[in-house]
Image: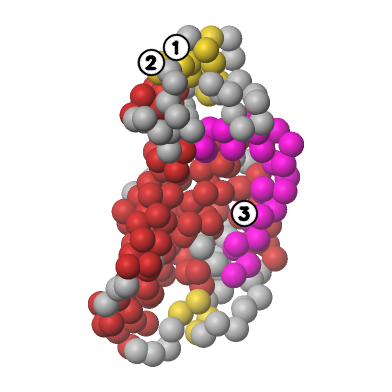
Amino acid sequence: MKRLYQRAAAIPMAGGHGVVLDGRLVKTPAARDLVVPSAALAAAVAAEWEAQQVEIRRERMPLTRLAGATIDRNATQREAIVRQVSHYAETDLVSYRASHPPALAARQHAVWQPLIDWAAERYGAPLMVTNGVIPASQPAASLDALAAVVAAQDDYALTALHAATAACGSLVIALALLEGRLDAGEAFAASQLDESFQIEAWGEDAEQAARRVALAAEVDAAARFTRLRC
């Protein structure tokens, strides 16, 4: 899509803050008004539109995408999103450890066990740890507690949590990101621990590198979206 507007800006309006292109309110993919709760988030979304050149590249507008998803999906799909995000706790990345090589097992324990311990203390949701890839049954009370945490998020935090959980493969890591226990770089590093270990030994191909860049951007966008929403 070509850029046909001269200026993007954020404006205060009833119900929050809107983003306008030459004075016309931006619409979401479902044709709803793009109105967000904070001036900071509206300004950041407007900056994404202002940064576009001849062609509008929506893949380079993560905050716009997350805001649109919040407005379009959470109104009608919130319960489904809560279930989808909560489901990650049943097979959370940080619960599955390698037995070999010892260096990898030690690194997993050093990075992931503090997050398991944090979730147990913060949410009353201890998770079982297992070696290998065979699924381990998690305590029902822990799964219920984590599901309640997910359900308690406001719509904008839920969108960020959804994006971060999918990018990290871990609800625990995503919650630590949203709560400030980890920053975006730390959350990405924790989620990519196994891949980074393999890259150190065998190197990285272009496709893998591109995928990791995209995932890091998703995690960073989720963290920014969380901070800016209030």
Q: Which residue is pictured at 53% across the width and 21% down the height?
A: 26
Task: Count every numbered label the image shows and give the total.
Answer: 3
Of marks 3 and 2, which one's residue comes earlier in the chain? 2
Q: Is residue 44 visible?
A: no
Residue under circle 2?
A: 6
Q: Dot 3 surroundings within 10 Å: few (below 14), some, or many (20 or more)?
A: many
* Image location of residue 17, percent across then percent down: 50, 16
Q: Give the labeled residue for mark 3.
A: 85
Q: Is residue 133 above or below residue 81?
A: below
**CB under 8 Å between callouts 3 and 2?**
no
Mark 1, other Cα within 10 Å: few <14 / some 14–19 / many ≥20: few
Q: Nearer the viewer, residue 57 or 202?
A: 57
**Residue at image location 60% in from the left, 62% down from the top:** 88
Dot 3 or dot 1, earlier in sequence: 1
Amino acid under label 3?
Val
In this orientation, does residue 105 appear?
A: yes
- For the record, the magenta segment spans 62-91
The alpha-carbon separation of the residues under discs 3 and 2 comes to 39 Å
Q: Name which residue lies at 70% across and 65% down.
A: 140
The residue type indicated by label 1 comes to: Asp
Q: Report how far apart the C-alphas of labels 1 and 2 lie in the structure.
A: 6 Å
Residue 153: image x %, image y %? 59, 40
What secondary structure prevails in the magenta region? helix
Q: Amino acid at mark 2?
A: Gln
Q: Are marks 1 and 2 in contact (CB under 8 Å)?
A: yes
Relative horizontal placement of residue 71, taking residue 11 as reference (left or right):
right
As drawn, 79 above or below 143: above
Q: CA distance from mark 3 to mark 1?
A: 38 Å
Q: What label sits on residue 59 in the rendered view?
A: none
